[in-house]
Image (cartoon, grey):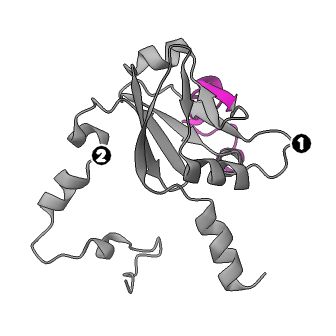
Amino acid sequence: MGLRSNLGVLLDQRFRGKSTHKVDTKGRVSIPADFRRVLDAADPDRDPGTNPRVHVLYGDTRYPWLTCYTVAAMQEVDAKMDALGDDHPDRELLEDYFYTYVETLTLDDSGRLILPRPLREQIGLEGDAMFASKGKTFRILSPEVPAPLASPLRTRLSELPEGFAITRLLVPASGGESGA
């Protein structure tokens, strides 16, 4: 695969945008079509004819949302966890977050998730669910969550100097500045 093809596959496995969908009384909610394509592409090793899975993390109760990982994104987490080693001081905390407080859910044939009642109650989800993309993950939250809490974007933008291009924040890990 050439560089352009690899980039296309990588971009196809990123969540983009946000949308709101009805949640029925049984907790069924339709996943946005673009999100379903990402979930499908990021779960390539599942059995033929089965629907894609999503890992729904709910252990960080400081925030009123559920964080959802694709199968491929969770495999990246697994690799990072393995690299930490068993004696890492935060290992147990991370294991609880990524392995204990997680529901692995499978989309139904209509592209819906059934969110268990305890998860819906934890984030105050009634009537509607907002899906907010975060690249390799997405969040499920109530549309009633105040905008500054749901996304710090506006707050951070107001802190930047006038004329500062947000793309300047895309600094590579090596410390050099992005050419964007």
Q: Residue 104 magenta-drawn?
A: yes
**What residue type is disc 2 on?**
Ser
Residue 23 highlighted magenta (yes or no): no
Secondary structure found at label 2: loop
Q: Which residues are magenta?
A: 77-105
Q: Residue shown at 61%/30% (left/top)?
A: 113
The reply to whether discs 2 and 1 touch (Cβ–Cβ < 8 Å) is no
- Residue drawn at point x = 62 percent, y = 33 percent: 112
**Residue tagged by mark 2?**
151
Relative to 138, say whether 154 is above or below. Answer: below
Q: Position of residue 67 (x, y in %)?
A: 50, 37
Is residue 95 among the parts visible in the rendering?
A: no
Number of residues whose C-alpha sits closer than 10 Å to that of mark 2, classed few (under 14), some (14–19) or many (20 or more) = few
Q: Name the residue at the right extreme.
A: 48
Q: Nearer the viewer, residue 89 or 1?
A: 1
Query: Can you say whether 36 is above or below 13 in the image?
Result: above
Q: In whole angstroms, how far apart are the C-alphas of marks 2 and 1?
A: 36 Å
The quarter of the picture where the C terminus appears is bottom left
Residue 162, image quadrant: bottom left
For label 1, the residue is 47
